[in-house]
Amino acid sequence: NIFFVPFKSFIFRHMPPLIVSQITGFRDKNNKKLRGISILCFLTAAQIMENRSFAAHRILQGIQLAEKAGCKIVSLGAFTSIAVRDGLDLLGKTKLGITTGNTYSAVIAIKNLKRALSLKGIKLSDVTVAVVGAGGSVGSGCAKALINNVNKLLLIDIQLKEIRNIFGNQSNIKTKLVLSEKIESIKEADAIIVVTNAVKGIIRKEFLKKNALVIDGAYPPNVSKETILARPDVLVVSSAIAKVPGVDLHFNFGLGKEEVHGCLAEALILSWLGVRNHYALGKVDENNMIEMDEVGSKIGLDAAAFRNLAGYLLGDAK
């Protein structure tokens, strides 16, 4: 089980992937101890976007390293899934099972949305929700989960054709559906899930409705610290972080105790199930989201404490 994190330093561009830690403290459904490893691909998000073929080569090197280490399943993380078309470009190139990590990341985003609305005393069915990056893997999964569960759904992506291909033929749905390529469309949203492949903050303070809720599931974050501080009326929650009882990464990923990124949590769930084949490649499937949610909850996984770039929120520090 491996988790790729783009490392923010240009000097590491020519360094091969490296095992940085062991993952312990997790067991499978038969109570057998599981061993995992964390592998770093030394690439920044910008480098991945600028040279995807080079990034894909590095990612494959990381997978080969995992195979030599005895791993059975690989979870991609952060921008690495983008470089390999959500895992599809890796088919036939490894004997390991591959999953993108995007499915459980989408599950966590929906969990955070529901919890935050509940804390505000707002019903999900009453709100207008925007998904920014709705044409991507995580974004499309979130959108699928929200259709028929919210009043109005704004699906926003710079690739308008992509969201039209995915959502353009919806029929017999209760939710009012609007497709747009304009990010300023979020001005009418009560709540926003933002999961784009932008390498910096793209949510401007003037685009946010008063007292809006933003679930930032992107890594790097799509909401800058400056925007967070400029709009104290807006609740911004960093998503894609899971709480996993007992797990120890033996490395400082900037997370709290027993916390992991959603991509790794997906690999842990699949390891608990004993899955060894490819799991979730391409766009996130809603049925996979349901399975990940049910199994994750069964074994004690949940969305982590609320926080954003400015710190922990609502007294959630652990």
Image (cartoon, rainbow, N blue to C red):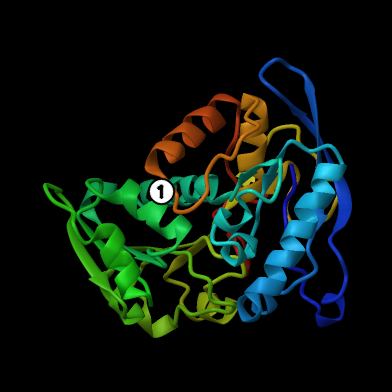
**Amino acid type assigned to the residue bearing label 1 in the image:** Leu
Q: Quadrant of the N terminus?
A: top right
Residue 33, compared with residue 270, is above or below; it is above
At 63% from the left and 73% from the top, the residue drawn is 52
Q: Nearer the viewer, residue 316 or 221?
A: 221
Q: Residue 175 appears at what percent x and percent y?
A: 18, 53
Most extreme residue toward the top, as rendered? 30
Residue 162 visible somewhere in the drawing: yes
Q: Nearer the viewer, residue 269 or 121?
A: 269
Q: Residue 164 appears at what percent x and percent y?
A: 26, 66
Q: Residue 234 appears at what percent x and percent y?
A: 43, 69
Q: Secondary structure at mark 1?
A: helix
Count every numbered label the image shows and give the total: 1
Residue 146, compared with residue 207, is above or below; it is above
Name the residue tied to disc 1: 119
Q: Quadrant of residue 224?
A: bottom right
Residue 313 visible somewhere in the drawing: no
Relative to 41, 169 lies left or right: left
Q: Quadrant of residue 248?
A: top right
Most extreme residue toward the front, as rendered? 92
Relative to 152, 299 lies left or right: right
At 84% from the left and 37% from the top, the residue drawn is 70
At 70% from the left and 23% from the top, the residue drawn is 28
Q: Quadrant of residue 136?
A: bottom left
Relative to 48, 115 lies left or right: left
Q: Nearer the viewer, residue 247 or 98?
A: 98
At 61% from the left and 25% from the top, the residue drawn is 273
Q: Residues within 10 Å of mark 1 (few under 14, many from 20)?
A: few
Most extreme residue toward the left, as rendered? 172
